[in-house]
Amino acid sequence: MFRDPKDQAKLAGVTLHHFHGGLQLRHNKRVSCELPIERAAPPERFYVPLLQHSGQEARPIVAAGQHVLKGEAIACFEHLGSGCLHAPASGTVSAIGTHPISHPSGFDGRCVVIEPDGLNQWTELHPVDNWQQADPDDLRQVIRSAGIVGLGGAVFPTAHKVDEASRRGIHTLILNGAECEPYISCDEMLMREQPASIILGARILQRAVGARRTVIAIEDQMGAVHQALQHALLESDAAEIDIVKVTTIYPEGGEKQLIQVLTGLEVPSGGRPTDLGLLCQNVATATAVARAVTEGKPLVERVVTVTGSGVRRPRNLLAPIGTPISVLVEQSDGYTDDAARLVLGGPMMGYALASDANPVIKAANCILVLSMDEIRPPQPEMPCIRCGECARVCPAVLQPQQLQWTVRHGLWDESVSAGLADCIECGCCDYVCPSHIPLVEWFRHGKSELRRLEAEHLAADSARQRFEAREARLDRLKQERRRRMEEKKRALGEGQEKQKRIADAIERARSRRQENP
Amino acid sequence: MFTAVILFTVLGSLLGLGLGWAAQKFRVETDPVVDRIDAILPQTQCGQCDYPGCRPYAEAIASGEAPINQCPPGGEAGIRALADLLGVEPLPLNPDNGQEQPRRVAVIDESACIGCTLCIQACPVDAILGAAKRMHTVIEAECTGCDLCLPPCPVDCIAMVPRQSPWAWPRPGQNTRLGASANSMPVQAGGG
Amino acid sequence: MIRRFDTGGAPHFPPQTTVRGVMLQVIYALLPGVIAHAWFFGPGIVVQILLACGFALLFEALCLTIRRRPLKLFLSDFSAPLTALLFALCLPPLAPWWIALVGMFFAIVIAKHVFGGLGHNLFNPAMVGYVVVLISFPQFMTAWLPALELASWTPTLGQVLSTIATGHPPGGLAWDAITGATPLDTIRTSVATGKMISEARLAPIFGDFGGLGWEWIANWYALGGLWLLWRRIISWQVPVTMIGSVVLLGLAAYLADPGSNPAPLQHVFSGALVVGAFFIATDPVSGCASPRGRLIFGAGVGIITLAIRRWGAYPDGVAFAVLLMNMLAPLIDRYTRPRIFGHPA
């Protein structure tokens, strides 16, 4: 019917489609939505990690002993053109030291440690005067320097995303409010309490990337959210923004799955939504954009859901980046007696932390404290019985049983052709496996290994090229030298002439030696 | 009984012809075997295999002159990959050629370097930057850890240190350093 | 005050199913059929089941010890008893005890552990065991008892036990005197002697649409199978295509030549077709994994079963059909992989 997928993508949200597999999970969200969002209590110290997403650390641009204001840039990234890290509060930089950094490896890392002075003084802010007339380039620059990253969990630098989007041409912006993982409710509360900010963020982003239309996707069980957003939409004079309810099934909120539901199209493997003329952003990211543009405030805080049966009073808190998790738990009335595991993120995709000294990072959408009953009891793994349940629930239409075989035995070519790179690590397969095989852990390991092997291959190729180039150069030099010797020999002449030239050269050398002893 | 013999002979011939035709029709074009062996070898260009570089060793393997177990940087994994490719039995690494070691890179102690360029001339992949009487330094990304720069250095200022690889998700079931640790994150600082 | 925690991998949800749970549910689903079997043909079948289970667990424990695997974990996963149960259901009720021994040896030791244990067997272990004893002990494996209400002599429990223990019928009776042909046997011999099937069907061993007793057993197996479908332990592809292909091809053959081809329903309700469709061909380890693959697998089993019933030397072909399709399963899987999200068609 449509020759170009982009034409089909323009009708995002008009009809809803289905994605393969998925799971109906118990939400466990209501309990954390009972209280409104509250500001987190200030901690004794903020620990802002310099490594907040994969790749390289940011470079600190402050030193120990320096006084900083809230929102002042304290570290910069050099690559991906992404923005900076900013001070979450005014105070003194007490050190740039090593501390837990809420990283899945459990390793410590370098942090900028700030002791707040309690004044909460903002640095000089430069809001955009009239964003409706502003140049989209300027808007994107503001996004970059505000250090905004995707707050849905992927923490991909937003500036890079919108830059690429505006280069390639976007017709529809999708705001992802379909928070599908159980327990997490930070986006839902944000949409209930600050719907106007989300609409504003949508309009600014729309202008920044040149999109003609925005679709805000929410889950169909978010009744209050729908009302709030509709109300805010009517109040603003926004045109071309639609609110669409999608079915509540995990992992509906995954970017690729959401696009498939809204448009029926699949983001090509190895490609991005911009290939279809679409840009997907989390609703919290939109709020951060609105704040950066209209108030000039960089990203220094985010809403974090503190929940699980291991905390006494689950709730959502507005926490500055760098706040230790222990502070948030304290504000939720502390741990219950059977708190057994601390997870950053949701129960399906989050990773466990070893202590609550770990700080809130930009990716921290949820702090989940689970009791022993709720977490997987350590069960011995059994061999795969090929029941096929994993393949039935996989949203990426993979065969996890085959993938885990190839990864386990290091059959990397087969892993690639079986689609390891397309795994979104949602955990659906793991959840239904009767043999309790840790599938997500295998696939994460497999992808790491593939990246490492890829890097090794590239390095080997480079080494081979350099070696061959060097051999060629040495060969060339040898040839040249041989040619020059032959020329010289020819220039020397034959017989008598040759003898005379040699005798002259010897005489010249002797006289020179006599002059300079 | 004769019918059975004739029947099976005819069947066998037909099937054999069929297989032969299929082998021709469905043949897959592949690189010459030397290239495929060279693609498996790690390109360290160290010479521990007793050949002057990875390509000569690949050619020797292809011609049957050399066994597949002479490459320490390739290690067990490399020998297995070669065995798979050539359809032979994997052999244990020949200890005469060296031991398998974790990847290393060379680091020049700049306070001791005299700028003699002997190491630059020795490096098979041109991974050392420098000139006569100028500071020499190893380009870490290009160093293959072949150790060839160590012998020529007259002041012994080159050391081999383990290469830092970025953190990767471990195999399930292995205990990694989860928990408060004194170890710092193996990262490369951006810029600087 | 820093609080420390133990860590673990994602997902952090309690597991929903276990291997043990899956096997147990299959066993539960078989029980109605077993009860029906005992109702119509006497307690012999229960004795066979107990014998087979015992030998199965014995061989399983032996193999696990030799292979140095955790004993308690694998012995309690109920996979060996399930194999034993499926095997025993194929046996005549008075089969001597060594039939179960040999069968379980080949099923557990050869077909399962030699190939790598749970999850690694290429062939369906129960069917391997059955085929071995079928070919090796033809006289015992064809000694079927007629339905209790038709039998001239019904053994007591004691006589059943003594026959199974000694291999000889009690009281000097000959095997011929106490055994009778199954419905499939009768059809085969009628066709061979040129009798019309419609005539043969008048014999009392034929019930309404299958064999007397056998059709009810098949019904109960089907009920159990439907429950398994509802519980998502098995998927619909194999039963539907297996029974569907038998019905379609059987119908075509019946319409073409009703004299020598039984009606489709007769095919469905005789022999091991229903239990095969829901319990044997759906064995996940030796079958296909992809949905399309399972369609082909089920159809293949149905077609080969019909072919063996019509032209082969054995009255029922389900076991051989399953083993032949097991051979093809990896190949079918390779070519029926579903298209991955985002990959071109």
Image (spheres, coloured by chain):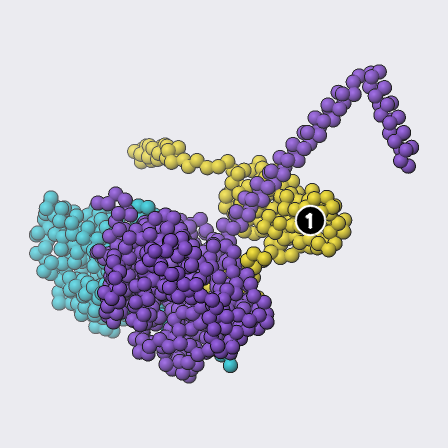
Chain colours: A purple, B yellow, C cyan
Q: Is residue B60 above or below residue C90?
A: above
Rendered-image quadrant of the C terminus of chain B:
bottom right
Amino acid identity at mark 1: His
Residue A281 seen in this snapshot: no
- Residue C64 appears at what percent x and percent y? 44, 65
Residue at image location 88% in from the left, 26% down from the top: A507
Looking at this view, is A278 or C157 the one in front? A278
Residue density around tag 1, few if under 14, some if 14–19, many if 20 or more, within 10 Å: many
Residue at image location 31% in from the left, 72% down from the top: A193
Which of the chains bears the disc numbered 1? B
- Residue B136 appears at what percent x and percent y? 69, 49
Residue at image location 62% in from the left, 49% down from the top: B139
Residue at image location 44% in from the left, 48% down from the top: A413
Rendered-image quadrant of the N terminus of chain B:
top left
Residue denoted by label 1: B136
Secondary structure beneath disc 1? loop
Residue A201 seen in this snapshot: yes
Q: Is residue C333 above or below residue B177?
A: above
- Residue C2 appears at what percent x and percent y? 51, 79
- Residue A351 appears at what percent x and percent y? 44, 68
